[in-house]
Image (cartoon, coloured by chain):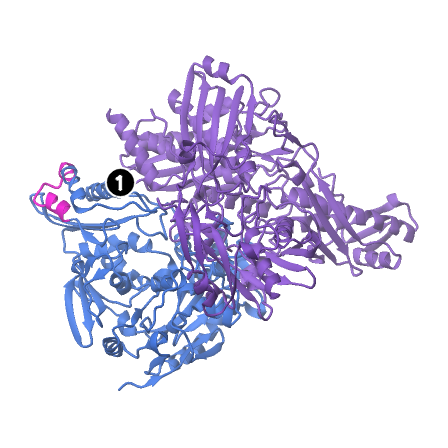
Amino acid sequence: MNKQTDISLATLHAPTRHDSGPKHVTGTAEYIDDMVEPVGTMHAYLGLSTKPHAEIISIDLDAVRAAPGVIGVLTAEDIPGENDVSPSHKHDEPIFAEGRVQFWGQPMFAVIAETRDAARRAAHLVKVEYHDLPHIPDVRAAQAAGGKLVTEPLKLERGDVETGLAAAPRRAKGAITIGGQDHFYLEGQIAFAVPGEDEDVTVYSSTQHPSEVQLMVAQVLAIRHNAVTVTVRRMGGGFGGKETQGNLFAAVAALAAKKWNRACKIRPDRDDDMSATGKRHDFVVDYDVGYDDTGKILAVDAVYGTRGGFSSDLTGPVSDRALFHCDNAYWYPAVRARSEPLYTNTVSNTAFRGFGGPQGMIAAERWVEDIAYALGKDPLDIRKANFYGTDTDNVTPYHQTVEDNIVHRVVEELEASSDYQARRQAVLDFNRSNNVLKKGIALTPVKFGISFTATWYNQAGALVHVYKDGSIHLSHGGTEMGQGLYIKVAQVVADAFGVNLDSIKIMATSTGKVPNTSATAASSGSDLNGMAAYNACAQIKARLTVHAAQLYQCDEAAVEWVEGGIKAGDTFVTFAELAASAYLNRVQLSAAGFYKTPKIHWDRATGRGHPFYYFAYGASVSEVTVDTLTGEYVVDRVDILHDVGKSLNPAVDIGQIEGGFIQGMGWLTTEELVWDDKGQLRTHAPSTYKIPLASDVPPIFNVQLAEWSENREPTIGRSKAVGEPPFMLAMSVVEALGMAVASVGDYKLAPQLDTPVTPERVLMGVERMKRARGS
Amino acid sequence: MIETTNAIRFLLNGEEIILTDVAPDLTLLDWLRLERRLRGSKEGCAEGDCGACTVLVGRMMDDEIIYDSVTACIRFVGSLHGTHVVTVEHLRGENGNLHPVQQAMVDHHGSQCGFCTPGFVMSLYGLWMRNPDPSRSAIEKALQGNLCRCTGYAPIIRAAQAISSHGQPQGDPLWAERIAVKEKIKALHDGRRVEIGAGDKRIIIPASLDDFAAVYEANPEARIVAGSTDVGLWVTKFMRNIGPVIFIGHLQELKRIAENASEVRFYAGVSYSEATSVIEANFPQLGELWDRIAGEQIRNMGTIGGNIANGSPIGDTPPPFIALGAKLHLRRGEHRREIKLEDYFIAYGKQDRQPGEFVESVTLPLLPAGETFAAYKISKRREEDISALCGAFRVFINHAGTVGMARIAFGGMAATPKRAKAVEAALLGKPWTMETIEAAIPAFAEDFQPISDMRASAQYRLLAAQNLLKRFFLESQGEGARLKRAVA
């Protein structure tokens, strides 16, 4: 059922290996820090603030400038253009702080030196005189201080919430605190700038958004976009952390490169990277939910306070997406969701896989859980009672009708394949006969909206060259951060031309090849770039078809694209021969492809529209064991059934699901961001910030694709996006931990665990249960 | 007078390296990447916690060459004298194809962004050489020190399980090189002391333990560096000047383990990994804790002596060692003295060690028959994490069923590793019952006023410490009170 691709070499939908796999394992895959540096390459290092909020009385840089190997220092005064890298164009994100600092770790200047070590050592010789200002550390403090916003709030509203709540026989009221997350990409932020003639500069940046880096560099240098070329071969992980956070580093490298007319590289130490760059937003969601005795939700009223940090960055769209996912897979007869994107004296929070969606969804699961425990039911029964309908009860809080709902089938199949009911009974039995160790099990669903909510982002370009020997150059606007986008798009092109993958050279992403690209984000990479590349191939194929018909004297309709070439009437011609003859006959063998997502529109002011092209679905079951004396736990088993439509590459997609789940589990369990009372982030390195290990992977980890699923929309190969949705499958771990905790109170009290659910939070939850039982 | 030389000599992959101008704080990773332009090994954290820079270092031990996975980011070049450094660039299969480890990783989709991958390949290579068909738990243990943010590890574990289907160590080119490499390395150990540089750039690599004692007595201002798992961070994170440095990690005399009927003596240079089998055999109660100390690379580097000598309040060996009644053997020149381990820790950052004096060994008495002993570590992440707290419990219950002896020690609860003397007193002479345990709980607050930090709150630390005593009691009664991960 693949209308767009008319032939197949089994390259599309095949579990093809990552194109860089052999280079990864041999250490020959080149990251920016591995590139050969031109002679005279300089190294930059940032000087960071050591106050969370203060006026800068004075900065003494004399010792810095005098330090061995130092070439010079950059401050705000050295910027010919704007001292700003705000991706929301609110001009609230200086490269170098001027007058005051607004978070601990904010860049104030950069040292340029002959070596990185010299620059780094010199940066620490600065003497800064501060005048402390009161600092706002978190959401509750920001609300208490009057709730200054970093960007405009959003309200989604449908139905009569007041009446719904007032009429509800029961209410769940409370608040959930949802922690943030550091991206912990293994390759930290890095940029490398090489000056060219005139105003030109080439910047190698570890970024998900080359076109935005191009814009920022141009803005900072006060030059036109066409003087800046940004190139990205690959990132050593991104996860959203390189959607906007690379801007500052690229700008500093370019600034230095142009000022001294020498190449310049900047790479912060891991501790500085974690202190100075944004993270997943933490939220506090205050909720009031009305429901009936069967557990059916009647009305939801919720406020989503989020720690925006000192600037707007992407806090607006992130908090919007939290609201877009305040329903997860549930239909609310009446709903009002309001965002509160708050100013705080912390690093400006940013994109991270799921982009606020996970925070919105976990709040929804919190009230489902509250309802279940209040009614003494299995939370799965409450979930089922509130799923979106297929023909009715299917309008979202943003007034888009859910047209592709498959949550019922996904959950039913997983419930059966995971043997959920029998295992839940076994868990209940175990808990009756064990005092110290307690078990929990939970099944949670995922429904995730696909498309950028900034509608103009939903476009992509590609550039395909066919050479005379039949070899192919492939460029597109998407970036490779490990997610397998490059191989998926190459599969599309190979399939379109009927050639082997080894005929295709996957080019580094460059603003010089494809202009005005969108960030590789919102899970949209293969949807957008796959289609754009397909479009380019289709143009070339159309020309070649005409050419072949003329050359071999047949009808265009008689030209058939087959494996390895074409059949023109009775003649088989290889693709390479066809390309060679096309060249001699002056047929253009290059095309720029383009794609824009249809159907979508969104009016933020009214909170109405059709922001998502389609939805991706999935569900997971997690089983855990908790030690009620210490709060330690193990995740014993996880079963996942996930919908990627008709998979473009099942190996890559399974990899995204496994990786997304474990990353989500880390967010919800051991990854805790801790700031001290001085405003300093204390978890700024892997010694203190704990992402999952191999030994945290559940001993039983069954991951299945919903192989029957095909995208109802005509996406590339009828596939669905896969980057973000699996991340939220990890919610079942929280719910399972909650059940184990609640068992201590005989399941009478909702566990209400905030995230991350560290061993400490589990133990405090157990203590709460014990106190309740005792009273 | 001992002979000296002014060159550090070691093998890098297939090449002999001779360095006469080396800073004491030059890390192996910087040297590989910046000077040798070998850029397969990556810097992910520069503190030994992510494993992206993992390389193998081969060293002589009892006439065998042992290859340890280590983190190059906190390993100093000065410590490499007489070793064979193997980086990812040296791996190759027969006929120049991918090495079996690499082929398995590619076939099983074990890389996504690829940045951590060379480190995983090296850790898996080290594992495969000594255990071609590892269990899942052996794989997980070998990968404790490698972080991957993309794959969720599942495909890497599948790859690890499939390596031997791509080839056996006996067919490995590196395996075939071993005999030649061994001869080369042995030749590098020529009985001379290495001395390079002057002032705070000075490196001293003593020729023997006695030479070390003499050199340190004469240069008490020098920094002793064994595994560099702590001092490495002073350089990479705090940019501290650490010189002059005496490197002692190569001294085989400091790697001795002496066992007799009543005690085990670990010399200070024994790494956690080297101690593992002896610990498991003699102190099986420490097996789980031992496997949860750091990651594999750090266990290969870090030493028992270093964990004690640096006086950290959160080191994992002092609490159980104190509970066991460990004796510490200190040496200055030819002068030796013995103290109780618990007396070594005076205050935060202050230990009972004189200028020129070093920790030579530690003696652990075997647990007398009839005594009960356990050690528990609590951390936010189960493995490769620093303790929020670590507690060790040892009691003797006499025939009357009362507590005849109690020694309890904690890390992470005070400024030093410390005994819980009030708790011990509350137990002593009382019947070994849950009532006694409950009655002893308030005594914890007399012994400890823990702090809140990024690892845990004070409240959690105190409550968990109290509950560990309960766990100890319940386990002594045969009740299942400890988590197990069900992996083969």
Q: How many marks?
A: 1
x and y percent of residue A11 in the render? 68, 49
Q: Disc 1 designates what residue?
A: B459
- Residue A175 shown left or right of residue A562 in the figure: left
Element marked by disc 1:
helix
The residue at 30%/50% (across/down) is: B387
Quadrant housing residue A644: top right
Answer with left or right where residue A65 lies relative to residue B399.
right
Identify the colour of chain A in the image: purple
Residue B434 covered by magenta stretch: yes
Chain B visual colour: blue
Q: Position of residue A291 (x, y in %)?
A: 45, 18
Q: Which region shows up in magenta?
A: B421-437
Q: Mostly what secondary structure, the magenta segment?
A: helix
Image position of B346 with respect to A770: above or below? below
Q: Is residue A280 magenta?
A: no
Q: Is residue A32 above or below residue A689?
A: below
